[in-house]
């Protein structure tokens, strides 16, 4: 659902009430990063759809730990002894992103139930949070670099997190700080940072980066650094605070590397050759460092202005599947994730490819791009392709040496499509097709498996998420899941089945009244017969769901 969002900077509080048409970008607000909430509310009423509108929430910035304040300290005064964190970069196991952080990033209107304090995220934004929390386990380096400079400049107040300066803050037992670091880490996957990495970063050279750092320091406009291996796999993020000429065309980029607390380290750039090199352990758990290096053609060293983090943000997944409130830089973008081993190859209707083709990386889809997140883990890039065209996605197990369970998730404006629990074998190739919009996903497997198909949509009314699995097939399957918002129906079909297939269904509806769930196992239909679920007339928790299976109709009860 799309309702309203709250914009906060310092002591200024602005409430923007959005109609059902909505909007898709927001300024950084002062929503809480800690574990408690004390926002009050006033106003009320209903939206044009007849559902309760989110009240105009007044935010007391003094109680919101991450509220941005006007900068008061020049970046030139940044010091390792006080402004870096004393603890090292870290991996999984700490408090990361919650709905509170996602609504702060994307706006209150990503709460499907219209409630800030008890936010139930839209399915698409909830899927984005799930992916982000998995990736941040590879290291919080980006968040540490950003929050260090924000605190040094006085834009975020360190005492709100427990100490007078960043270096004196403790990480252990400090969940508000852990949430804040994850929040700033996540900005790299949102626009404008994401677009800068895929567009500007695709042409940036080491000499360009040196110039950006020098210019930023001179103008008091700091930047952060991200760098990767030549193959854009493992990477790292740091905070540069100086450039030193060493003679004969060599310069050192002095930077705060959060894997080495308290150490002054440098990246060497040969401006004559337009090359760079550095040695670090990008993975916080890594004991042996790696050598990183690149040149003017690798585009593996990239600078991002801090201003890109604190201005307007557009989140992946924002918008409505029915078109209302779907605008902004990511409104026509589908973002594709692979969790697990193997590679992806994406093809559009014209035969263009993006991903790994014959062991080599290709990027041919007009408007398509890839983004390597700087973490210590060698992971598949995140892919972006335009909406509006049919896609075929191949999950390739050619590089596997043993079976592995993998998930593929596609997040678009107001929707999420996922194929989960794919048991991929060495050299196996599974594939699935996506409709030009979000309405149909078909999956084909070469193996004997029962993956789950998941489809979630955000609308100007209720939001829905459906997960369906087929059990009983004895050979490779083609499974199709579709949804018709106008009719309030979704359908599931196993093509070429053996007639002995049972279906497990999990349905959720989220609206202003909260979340309602329906679960059922063991539904059956004949060979190549679709099962039609009429969720539009469903009354909610514990109520039966009207189902048409194999030509017969019935009201099926909840089994949970």
Image (cartoon, grey):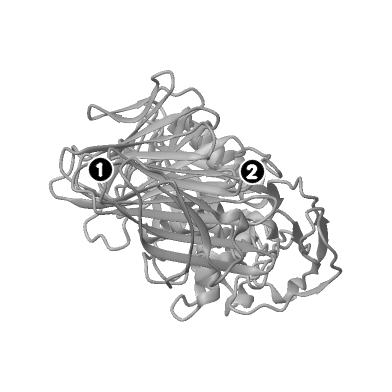
Which of the 4 image quarters holds residue 349? top left
**Can you say whether 197 is above or below 263 in the image?**
above
Residue 338 pos. (x, y %) = 35, 46
Contact flag, marks 1 and 2 (Cβ < 8 Å): no
* Nearer-the-camera pick, 15 or 418: 418
Question: How many numbered discs?
Answer: 2
**Can you say whether 290 is above or below 392 in the image?**
below
Q: Earlier in the sequence, mark 1 or mark 2?
A: 1
Residue 503 in view, yes or no: yes
SS for callout 1:
loop
Which of the 4 image quarters holds residue 192? top right
Task: Give the residue displayed 65% in from the left and 66% down from the top.
Answer: 156
* Nearer-the-camera pick, 437 or 199: 437
SS for callout 2:
loop
**Can you say whether 507 is above or below 171 in the image?**
above
Task: Give the residue displayed 68% in from the left and 72% down from the top.
Answer: 64
**Image quadrant in which the C terminus is located:** bottom left
Task: Give the residue displayed 45% in from the left and 52% down from the top.
Answer: 238
**Image quadrant in which the N terminus is located:** bottom right
Quickly name the residue at label 2: 486
Quickly name the residue at label 1: 342
Q: CA distance from mark 1 to mark 2?
A: 38 Å
User: Farthest residue in the left direction?
Assistant: 401
Q: Of circles 1 and 2, which is in front?
A: 2
User: Farthest residue in the top direction?
Assistant: 350
Which of the 4 image quarters holds residue 230? top left
Task: Give the residue displayed 38% in from the left and 43% down from the top.
Answer: 493
Residue 263 pos. (x, y %) = 39, 62
Residue 449 pos. (x, y %) = 23, 50
Other-residue count near label 1 (Cα within 10 Å), few / some / many at <14 / 14–19 / ≥20: many
Residue 83 in view, yes or no: no
């Amino acid at each position: 659902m799309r309702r309203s969002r709250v914009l906060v900077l310092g002591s200024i509080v602005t409430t923007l009430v959005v109609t059902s048409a909505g909007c898709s970008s927001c300024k950084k607000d002062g929503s809480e990063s800690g574990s408690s909430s004390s926002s009050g509310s006033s106003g009320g009423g209903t939206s044009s759809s007849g559902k309760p509108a989110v009240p105009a929430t007044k935010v007391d910035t003094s109680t919101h730990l991450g509220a941005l304040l006007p900068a008061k300290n020049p970046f030139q005064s940044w010091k390792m002894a006080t402004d870096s964190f004393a603890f090292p970069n870290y991996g999984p196991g700490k408090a990361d992103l919650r709905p509170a952080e996602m609504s702060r990033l994307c706006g209150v209107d990503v709460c499907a139930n219209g409630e800030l304090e008890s936010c139930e995220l839209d399915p698409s934004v909830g899927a984005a949070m799930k992916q982000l929390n998995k990736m941040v386990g590879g290291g919080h380096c980006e968040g540490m670099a950003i929050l260090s400079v924000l605190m040094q400049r006085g834009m975020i107040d360190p005492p709100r997190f427990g100490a007078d300066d960043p270096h004196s803050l403790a990480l252990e037992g400090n969940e508000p700080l852990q949430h804040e670091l994850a929040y700033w880490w996540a900005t790299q996957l949102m626009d404008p940072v994401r677009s800068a990495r895929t567009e500007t970063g695709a042409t940036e050279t080491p000499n360009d980066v040196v110039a950006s750092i020098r210019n930023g320091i001179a103008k008091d406009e700091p930047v952060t650094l991200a760098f990767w291996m030549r193959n854009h796999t493992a990477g790292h993020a740091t905070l540069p605070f100086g450039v030193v000429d060493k003679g004969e065309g060599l310069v050192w980029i002095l930077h705060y590397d959060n894997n080495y607390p308290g150490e002054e380290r440098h990246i060497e750039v040969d401006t004559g050759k337009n090359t760079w090199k550095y040695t670090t352990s990008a993975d916080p758990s890594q004991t042996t460092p790696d050598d990183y290096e690149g040149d003017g053609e690798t585009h593996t060293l990239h600078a991002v202005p801090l201003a890109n983090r604190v201005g307007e943000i557009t989140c992946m997944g924002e918008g409505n599947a029915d078109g209302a409130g779907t605008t902004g830089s990511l409104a026509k973008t589908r973002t594709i994730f692979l969790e697990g081993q193997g590679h992806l190859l994406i093809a559009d209707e014209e035969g263009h490819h993006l991903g790994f083709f014959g062991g080599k990386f290709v990027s041919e889809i007009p408007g398509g791009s890839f983004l390597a997140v700087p973490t210590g883990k060698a992971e598949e890039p995140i892919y972006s392709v335009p909406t509006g065209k049919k896609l075929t996605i191949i999950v390739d197990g050619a590089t596997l040496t043993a079976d592995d369970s993998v998930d593929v998730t596609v997040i678009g404006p107001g929707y999420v499509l996922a194929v989960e629990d794919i048991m991929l074998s060495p050299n196996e190739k599974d594939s699935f097709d996506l409709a030009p919009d979000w309405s149909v996903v078909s999956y084909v497997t070469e193996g004997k498996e029962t993956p789950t198909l998941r489809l979630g949509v955000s609308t100007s009314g209720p939001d829905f998420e459906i997960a369906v699995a087929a059990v009983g097939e004895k050979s490779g399957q083609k499974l199709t899941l579709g949804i018709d918002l106008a009719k309030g129906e979704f359908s599931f079909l196993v093509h070429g089945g053996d007639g002995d297939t049972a279906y497990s269904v999990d349905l959720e509806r989220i609206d202003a009244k909260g979340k309602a769930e329906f679960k059922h196992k063991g539904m059956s239909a004949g060979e190549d017969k679709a099962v039609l679920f009429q969720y539009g007339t469903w009354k909610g928790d514990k109520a039966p769901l009207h189902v048409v299976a194999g030509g017969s109709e019935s009201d099926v009860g909840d089994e949970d």
